[in-house]
Amino acid sequence: MKKLKRISAVMCAGALALSLGACSSKETSSSNTKKESTGYPTKAITVVAPSGAGGGWDLTARSFTKVLSETKLVKQPLTVENKPGGGGAVFMAEYATQQAENNDMLFVNSPPIIINNLKKEGNSPYGYKNTTPLAQLTKDYGAIVVKKDSKYKDLKSVLEDVKKDPRKLTFAGGSAPGSMDHLVSILPAYKYGVDPTKIKYVSYDGGGEAITALLGGNADVIGTDASSVKEFLKAGKIRVLAVTAAERLGGDFKDVPTAKEQGIDAEFTIWRGVFGPEKMSAEAKAYWEKAIDKLVNSPEWKTEVETQGWELEYKNSADFKTFLDDQEKQVQQLLEALGMQK
């Protein structure tokens, strides 16, 4: 009987030890789970505009951070950093190779993230597939712009001169040859029957620098995004000859005809979106998906979009990724038509 009691006591002790071990294991597991959840974000967030100040990326990044801060949707400090070079290609190389796991650095971009990766000249080995697409925020359109005192009053008069002598005028834009502003600049001429490879195009880092070149007499015509020239249009410093929308825009652009209205079938939509690093953590991705969804539905963001002259067009992470896959095919076809594909 004593022997049985001793065995029973040993068994009870073993059971107790196993029970305590299990409890300890649960506590450890719980503790580890807490350690894995960092409570993101814990640091200041940098939103990069891969261009100089004043262009569409810069304005988008500043509007994005401003409204997120004002609405307190993001409690951590948000700063905008300009990293110009190669129409976004220089930053893209750094981001893809050195910041692939940096959850605290986002950036804004538009069709150049696709174009730079597909074009022949100065192409980037990195594109949107080396990122985590978070959301499309807006859409904008291309604009063909001259100085207010230019002799050109409409798009056709420019194209007629270019058709006679493709080198007569200097076109400029805020992105590298073969990139978005270049495509916007030459698309109407291409559609008008001009060999786009013979047109003189000068690239600048950002729309702001391109406008400065135009106003300073270093360019005759610029192709850029409509929203970035809005203030110059209001100030009476420029004339917008055409926009690449399907129909006329409202507000300050209500009197500007589309290229299509002038008989040139040149439409080009400029979307803008936010991206994270390729190896962004699931926690950070979920955080930004939620924050951006709340942002785009806020009255403050809708007011900001209207103030900037953009059009709100939101796509969440999954839909944005699908859209980019489709846009890549479209851009490839356009570059092939222009003889600029890699």
Image (tube, rainbow, N blue to C red):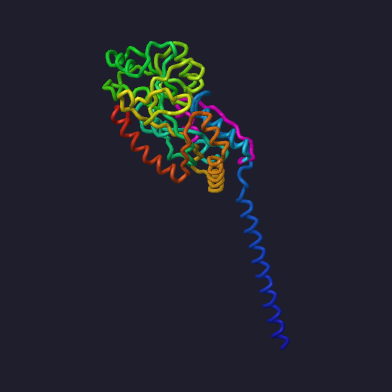
In reply to whether residue 74 is colored magenta, the answer given is yes
- 38 to 63, vertically: above or below: below
Q: Position of residue 217 (x, y in %)?
A: 44, 11
Work out whether 116 lies above or below 222.
Answer: below
Q: Nearer the viewer, residue 50 or 301?
A: 301
Residue 302 in the image: state x and y as whole percent: 53, 36
* Segment tinted magenta in the rendering: 73-96
Outermost residue to the right = 2
- Residue at coordinates 45% horizontally, 16% vertically from top-left? 238
The x, y position of residue 329, in whole percent, is: 34, 38
Quadrant of the snapshot with the C terminus: top left
**Residue at image point 52% right, 37% down:** 99
Percent position of residue 183, x then y: 36, 26
Of residue 20 and residue 55, the one placed in the foreground of this image is 55
Residue 178, above or below 70: above
Q: Nearer the viewer, residue 262 or 197?
A: 262
Residue 96 visible to an observer of this rendering: no
Side of 320 where 331 appears, left or right: left
Decide if residue 266 is in sight here. Answer: yes
The image quadrant where one finds the N terminus is bottom right
Q: From what the image shows, is residue 163 above or below residue 90?
A: above
In the rendered picture of this protein, how many numbered marks are placed on residues?
A: 0
- Indicate whether residue 127 is drawn in magenta: no
> At x 35% / y 16%, what residue is drawn?
200
